[in-house]
Amino acid sequence: MATDHPVVLSPPGGDGGRRVRIDGHYIGIAYSLLDVVAFLQEAGLQDWGEMDVVRSSLIDWRGIGPEVWPG
């Protein structure tokens, strides 16, 4: 992964979903931490779980952090 924050999660949309970008590429919409984990596992981080996502400095949580998933 090429940048300091290669994973970007946008602020929640009206339906509570957050757009996910990895290395500048749109991957999909996450509605929970488990969705983010699945996207990262598909991107090659197979050993990652929820706590890895919450603690990682590779992820830029825009607008609101990983603890809130409206919807």
Image: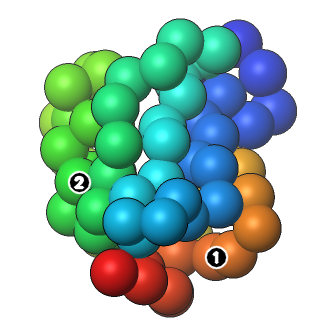
Q: Quadrant of residue 44?
A: top left
Q: Which mark is residue 48?
A: none
Q: Is residue 57 visible?
A: no
Question: Residue 37: where, in percent of width, then height?
Answer: 27, 52
**SS of the residue at dot 2?**
helix
Tell me the residue at 48%/19% (across/down).
26
Question: Residue 6: where, in percent of width, then height?
Answer: 66, 28
Left or right relative to 25: residue 28: left
Observer-nearest of 69 and 66:
69
Please state which amino acid type lies under the numbered disc 2. Answer: Asp
Observer-nearest of 48 and 60:
60
Q: Is residue 25 visible?
A: yes
**SS of the residue at dot 1?**
loop
Q: Is residue 29 above or below residue 30?
A: above
Tell me the residue at 19%/44% (across/down).
38
Q: Earlier in the sequence, mark 2 or mark 1?
A: 2
Quadrant location of the N terminus in the rendered image:
top right
Q: Which mark is residue 35?
A: 2
Q: Residues within 10 Å of mark 2 (few under 14, many from 20)?
A: some
Please state which amino acid type lies under the numbered disc 1. Answer: Gly
Q: Which residue is mark 1?
A: 65
Quadrant location of the C terminus in the rendered image:
bottom left
Q: Quadrant of residue 39?
A: top left
Question: Residue 69: where, in percent of width, then height?
Answer: 42, 80
